[in-house]
Image: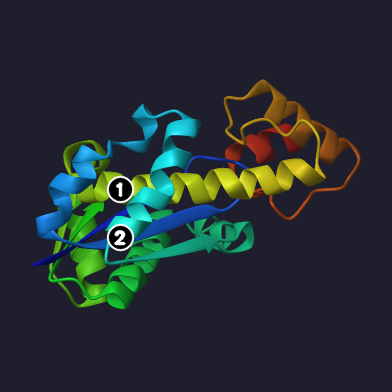
Amino acid sequence: MYLCGVDDAGRGSVLGPLVIAGVLVHHSKLQKLKYIGVRDSKKLTKQSRSKLYNKILDLVDDYHVSKIHTKKIDQYVYVHNLNLLEAEYMGKTISILRPQISYVDSCDINATRFGNLVSRISNSKIISLHHADSKLIVVAAASIIAKVNRDNAIKKIQRQYDNIGSGYPSDIITHKFIKNCIKNNLMPNFVRNSWKTVRKLSNL
């Protein structure tokens, strides 16, 4: 049986893309993923994720990565539909990989509702769980692929702009960067204008 795991990276960030990654793997290889050290990307260092990245791609049967641009993210957030955006891209990923069963990390408080939405989009069997990346090795593998691609996207931005920070709203450096952008009336296209952080700073 071929299984698919799908996860996101960068959902909460105010800067950069939202990344959706899926991996397709035969169930007989799950133990090999565990053996090489695959686990929830949040529990790994950046260096560990980078080392595992190519090992995972060598081991899985297929994979797919989507980087969702800030403009698209803003369109959905302004109408309070970020969950739908994730469901659409997860559904597209699963349709491309064509597994027999898929496991997704639910971003909705109602995991069943989110799973049903992804299932309708992909026309396939979906099991949706909260914290699936810490419970299932196939989703953990997807989380690493998503996170490394997200990290690389932020690195690319950092080469063009100094001191953007991590991109997350809790980062003081990121706050300062956005404040300066607002002050100079020069907002780069990688800033999510729909985020509360930007809107609050704009009203200062």
- Where residue 73 is drawn, which disc sits there? none
Q: Secondary structure at mark 2?
A: strand
Q: Position of residue 20 (x, y in %)?
A: 42, 57
Give the amino acid at mark 2: Val
Residue 59 lies left or right of residue 189; in this view the side is left
For the question of whether residue 107 can be seen, the reply is no
Q: State the image coordinates of residue 164 (x, y, percent, origin top left).
A: 73, 34
Query: Residue at (35%, 69%) from the top-left corner?
Result: 93
Judge by depth and name the residue closer to the eye, 164 or 25.
25
| Corner quadrant of residue 151 | top right
First of labels 1, 2 by sequence position: 2
Q: Residues within 10 Å of mark 2 (few under 14, many from 20)?
A: many
Q: How many marks?
A: 2
Q: Is residue 30 left or right of residue 180?
A: left
Q: Name the spot of residue 28 as percent of width and height, x first.
A: 10, 57
Q: How is the image coloured?
A: rainbow
- Three-letter code for the amino acid on which mark 1 is drawn: Ala
**Dot 1: what SS?**
helix
According to the image, label 2 marks what residue? 23
- Residue at which label 1 appears: 141
Q: Residue at x 75, y 36 (%)?
A: 178
Q: Is residue 142 left or right of residue 170?
A: left
Instruction: Please determine whether, in this image, residue 183 is positioned above or below residue 23.
Output: above
Q: Is residue 88 visible?
A: yes
Residue 109 shown left or right of residue 169 in the figure: left
CB of mark 1 within 8 Å of CB of mark 2?
yes
Q: Quadrant of the N terminus?
A: bottom left
Farthest-out residue, top = 172
